[in-house]
Structures are given as C-alpha cells and as structure tokens.
Amino acid sequence: MKRQFLKLILAGAVTALAQAAFAFDLPAKFDPKRDAAADVAAATALAKKQGKRVIVDVGGEWCPWCHILDRFITRNADVKKLVDDHYVWLKVNFSKENKNEAVLSRWPKVDGYPHLFVLDGDGKLVRSQETASLEAEKDYDKAKVIAFLTQYRGK
C-alpha cells in the first residue's frame, strides 16, 4: 500500500515537472520560427517565479561568436553555475529569415552579435551588453564574463 502511494506521488511529481518544463519551453537554438515575444514573456515569468533575471541572447545560427559563447559557458563550470543559479537564458533569433524587429525594438539598437540584454523579473531592461568587450582572442575572457554575470545577477 505504501509503495503504491509513493509511486503515485512520484508519478504526480514527474508529471508536474514535465508540465512546468513544457510551459516554459524556451529555445535551445536561435530559431527564426519562434515567437520571440511569447518567449520573452515566458522567460520573464519563469525568472520572476524563480527570483532570477533573464538574459536575452540575440544572435543566429549563422553567428560563429554565438556558438563560441555557448561552448564557453558549457565548458566553464563556474560560469555555467552563475548562469543557472541567477538567470533564465533566452535565445532570440536575428537573421534574414526573421529579424524579430518588434521585440528587439523594445531595447537599444544592437550593433553586433551576440548581444545580451539583461531583464529583471518584470521584463524591465537592466543592461544592454555588447559581447566584443568580453572576448579574449578567439574565445571569451573568463574574468570579464564572470564580472558581468555577477554584476547584473540581482539580489
């Protein structure tokens, strides 16, 4: 009896987690077919619920530095932990297929890619960050990226 009860509880928890993940199905890649406004709203709602900020990562699959940034975050555990603990990361596509002008017009003009916008849980712009100043040769500068993430992480 206890075992069945525990299985029921576990099944319910797994279902709830799956539904929560589905409700906030944010893109893992820059996808021109995504509804960027809906994604920003979902990321903001998730950030508010979790007490985090949002990083809107503007770029495209065509952008080498966008992929370098992804690899940099993935292979630096301390950077990844800062991102995971304090931010909801959202990729917003900018390409010839979809420039997402309506969403991007909310914030300062982007001059290069990737470009990062930090939003609070209410969707208010906290920081517009070009990434060239975070680069180091053919990669990103770990100390600069950590300083950026630390400075704008909020409370």
Image (cartoon, grey):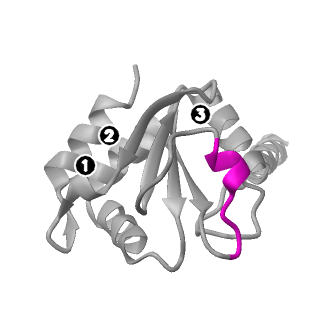
Q: Residue at x 72, y 42 (%)?
A: 42
- Residue 46 picture quarter: top right
Q: Is residue 13 left or right of residue 126?
A: right
Give, as a three-letter code, the residue at label 3: Ala
- Measure the alpha-carbon separation of dots 1 and 3: 20 Å
Which residues, given as a range, are shown in magenta? 97-105
In the picture, the disc for residue 47 is 3
Secondary structure beneath dot 3 equals helix
Q: Earlier in the sequence, mark 1 or mark 3?
A: 3
x%, y% of residue 84? 44, 45
Q: How many marks?
A: 3
Residue identified by numbered label 2? 149
Front residue (pair 51, 127): 127
* Residue on which the image places disc 1: 145
- Circles 2 and 1, Cβ within 8 Å, touching? The answer is yes
Position in image of residue 54 (x %, y %) = 53, 39
Q: Position of residue 14 (x, y in %)?
A: 74, 50
